[in-house]
Image: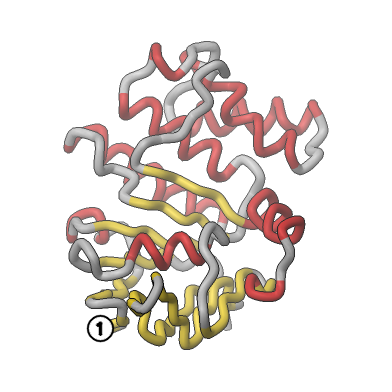
Amino acid sequence: MSKTILTVTDLKKCYGPVEVLHGVDFAVDAGERVALMGPSGSGKSTLLNCLSGIERWEHGQIRIDGFDLGQADRGGLERLRRESIGYIFQAFHLLPTLSAYENVELPGQLIGMSAAERRRRVTELLEAVGLGHRAGHRPDALSGGERQRVALARAVMHRPRLILADEPTGSLDSVAGAQVLNLLKQLSADHGIALLLVTHDPATAEICDRTVHMRDGRIEETP
């Protein structure tokens, strides 16, 4: 039986008097790819912010790889983010003054990975996403699809247990988006990384094993 990496139990989140998450429950197993879908305003972004520790919640529990986010102090959350979670965003969020190589290398530096291991990992990952020849280029010299592929390599550099991906192809054309999705699926499978993929697009969700639907701050179905 697969180990459960992410568990969300009866999660409720309010902004002032308005409750935006109404007792959300779901789980993601190790290596499983889950799409989180729903219309704008359904609570997907709020849920993702809670999962990443950016926002606090009023009731319920989030556990990632056995770690209770609700009981964590700031240092504990930072360690969890550095060691167990990878992030991929629609807007890439690469550091503009660093090369593609240096952007991918950064998570390894933050967890104390040796220089030799960092070199091996960065080289391997940039080759895997087809950008070995672009390692020395900064983000402003890369296309949107190339930037997202760098972001993807960065997200798995530190061997996270879970990737949180927020509309990772939303700013890409269809060809570049398809390339990024195929690579994301392959890297998840090759490294046994669980994936929670937030998307509006049913075609994007097809790389996942199952889909969780949200509407009005609730889980609607988990087929």
Q: Is residue 161 above or below residue 186?
A: below
- Frontmost residue, 93 versus 21: 21
Q: Quadrant of the C terminus?
A: bottom left
Q: Is residue 89 above or below residue 147?
A: below
* Residue at 33% from the left image edge and 59% from the top image edge: 198
Q: Quadrant of the N terminus?
A: bottom right
Q: Is residue 88 visible?
A: yes
Q: State the colouring used for the structure image.
A: secondary structure
Question: Left or right: where does residue 177 sit relative to residue 30?
Answer: left
* Residue at 39% from the left image edge and 70% from the top image edge: 15
Q: Percent x, y for residue 165?
A: 41, 52
Q: Is residue 223 visible?
A: no
Task: Please state which amino acid type lies under the numbered disc 1.
Answer: Glu
- Frontmost residue, 137 versus 58: 58
Q: Percent x, y for residue 220?
A: 25, 83
Residue at the extreme front: 17
* Residue at 40% from the left image edge and 27% from the top image edge: 147
Q: Percent x, y for residue 80?
A: 68, 58
Residue identifier under label 1: 220
**On the image, which quarter does residue 121 sit in?**
top right
Question: Left or right: where does residue 41 sit relative to residue 15?
Answer: left
- Frontmost residue, 108 versus 98: 98
**On the image, which quarter does residue 207 sit in?**
bottom left
Label 1 crowd bin: few (<14), some (14–19), many (20+), radius 10 Å:
some
* Residue at 40% from the left image edge and 44% from the top image edge: 89
Q: Is residue 27 above or below residue 84?
A: below
Q: Which structural element holds mark 1?
A: strand
